[in-house]
Amino acid sequence: MGMDKDMDLIDEDGLRLDGRKFDELREINIEAGILKRADGSAYLTWGKNKVMAAVYGPRELHPRHAQDPSKAVVQARYNMASFSVPDRKRPGPDRRSVEISKLMSEALEEIVFVEQFPRSAVDVFVEILEASAGTRCAAITAASVALADAGIPMSDMIASCASGKIDGHVVLDLGKNEDNFGEADVPVAIVPRTGKITLLQMDGNLTIEEYEEAMELAINACHEIYDIQREALKKRYSTSIDSYEDLEEV
Ligand code: UDP
């Protein structure tokens, strides 16, 4: 965002660099329950993003002074692997990962029935293994499936997607070059069943009309993503009973 523009992001046929239409998502695949030792997990690929989410809990929160006697605390930790981006990312937390961890924790706390687990923690670890724009949305989407896979009581999942503006057009789900050379990026997350917005950020500038168009695009896409999330869970729980591998170490 805000970088000098030195490439066309939309061709003469009205298609984007990767051939997508304005309202088209990158391909998303989600697999639930792939880590044996986590209480819940999900592996998600979204375009060139690769994301692993693991959930542990609810369990007693340590240190004790961090406990809340009235509810569980959802502690999300977003981490970008050093090998996930072309310019090696310095390992460890930075301002950006602390910000994303915080917004993830706040969003996910909206859906978990935290009152049922006083003094507990629900830990959500998200590892970005490959990053190519939109990783915070991918992280929230994967984490929601991992929470559901863990069997944690919750009201719904959260689905997340960004929209934005490139070459003067409002489009869905910016890719890396679109994110770098576009005019705006608007990550959104919703609770699909209620429509409640649990994340809304904006990098860049939009008019009010463009903003409304961007919101509509992102919210529609969240419902599409919600279907993919539910399919991943259905797939997981329609096969696990037959799988000896899953039963072996119980
Ligand atoms: N990125 C990077 N190095 C970093 C942080 C980000 O190369 O240290 C890239 C990465 O591809 C990421 C993109 O920049 O997906 C956009 O980052 P942003 O902060 O907008 O978050 P995101 O779109 O991933 O939610």
Image (tube, rainbow, N blue to C red):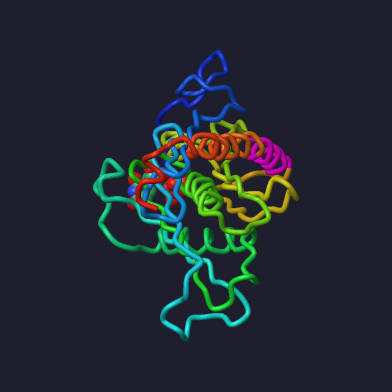
- Main SS of residues in magenta: helix
Q: What residue is shown at x 55% (from left), y 54% (from top)?
A: 151
Asked whether 165 or 66 is in front, the reply is 66
Can you tell which quarter of the image residue 162 is in? top right
Can you tell which quarter of the image residue 247 is in? top left
Give x and y (percent) for residue 222: 63, 40
Q: Is residue 202 above or below residue 241?
A: below
Mark yes or no: residue 1 visible.
no
Asked whether 148 or 109 is in front, the reply is 148
Asked whether 72 or 94 is in front, the reply is 72
Q: What residue is shown at x 45% (from left), y 44% (from top)?
A: 33
Q: What residue is shown at x 47% (from left), y 49% (from top)?
A: 139
Q: Is residue 193 above or below residue 79?
A: above
Q: What residue is shown at x 35% (from left), y 51% (from top)?
A: 249
Give x and y (percent) for residue 44: 45, 39
Mark yes or no: residue 26 visible.
yes
Can you tell which quarter of the image residue 211 is in? top right
Q: Looking at the image, which residue sits at the far top?
A: 13
Q: Looking at the image, which residue sits at the far bottom?
A: 65
Q: Is residue 88 left or right of residue 73?
A: left
Q: Is residue 90 above or below residue 65?
A: above
Q: Is residue 18 left or right of residue 159?
A: left
Asked whether 37 or 29 is in front, the reply is 37
Residue 225 is covered by the magenta coloring? no
Q: Which residues are magenta?
A: 209-222
Residue 221 is covered by the magenta coloring? yes
Q: Is residue 144 left or right of residue 86?
A: right
Give x and y (percent) for residue 76: 47, 62
